[in-house]
Amino acid sequence: KDVNRGWTINCPSGWNKFEGEVGAYDVKWQDLVDPTANIKVSSNPVKSTTTSIDALGEIGPLGESLAEKRNAKLIRSEERLTDSILFYTFEFAISDGTHQLLSLSVNKGRVWSLDASSKESKWGKSKELYYNVIRSFTPKLV
């Protein structure tokens, strides 16, 4: 729980935590053993009329657009509704050998981005951990 920022997440224990880097992330966790494995939370203000992530479009076309911008292959996309907040989650295989999970949502006048990535070669071992972290994130205190 981060009371000051107003969100909750179950992040991996034993990972290094870094406070925000302006324009990059609000908080980042990095694996001690493999520094390329990391989880980042970031947020940006949106118009007060934007109340849900579906304002960005339907999940399928949005996922394809995000994949193209990353020079990646979209592996999977899913929607979930938690505490009346709609989340879009995308799984990408990026051409540089990185595997990424990206979850997007809108709450409290902000678009929230949760980015979990690791080397493609380590993805099989870390996939479940990353999905659990992504699904635990709620941009409000519960």
Image (tube, rainbow, N blue to C red):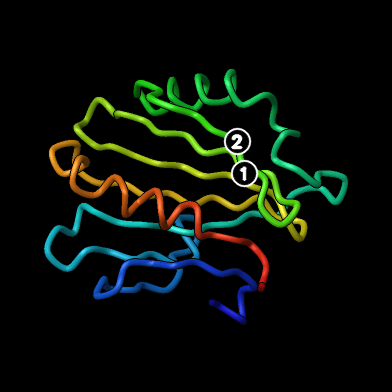
- Label 1 packing within 10 angstroms: few (<14), some (14-19), many (20+): many
**Vertical relation: 82 (above or below) 20:** above
Q: How many marks?
A: 2
- Rendered-image quadrant of the C terminus: bottom right
Label 2 secondary element: strand
Q: Is residue 7 above or below residue 108?
A: below
- Going from N to C along the chain, the mark reached first, 2 or 1, is 2
**Label for residue 87?**
1
The residue nearer to you, when weighing 44 against 5, is: 5
Residue name at image x 34 percent, y 73 percent: 17
Q: Is residue 53 above or below residue 133?
A: above
Q: Nearer the viewer, residue 107 or 45?
A: 107
In the rendered image, the vertical position of residue 54 relative to residue 138, given as above or below: above
Q: Residues within 10 Å of mark 2 (few under 14, many from 20)?
A: some
Locate residue 110: give its quadrant.
bottom right
Residue in the image at 25% along x and 25% along y: 95
Q: Which residue is mark 2?
A: 79
Residue kind at label 2, given as amino acid type? Glu
Check contact, mark 2 vs mark 1: CB within 8 A: yes
Looking at the picture, how far across and down is residue 102, in whole percent? 46, 42
Determine whether, in the image, residue 49 is placed left or right of residue 77. right
Q: Position of residue 89 (x, y in %)?
A: 51, 39
- In percent of width and height, residue 67 lies at 43, 24
The image position of residue 20, as x and y in percent, is 45, 69
Please report the residue visible at 24 percent of the width from the left and 46 percent of the height from the top: 118
Q: Amino acid at mark 1?
A: Phe
- Asked if residue 75 lies left or right of residue 105, the reply is left
Task: Determine the CA span between mark 2 and mark 1.
Answer: 6 Å
* Picture residue at 44% right of the left edge, 67% below the top: 10
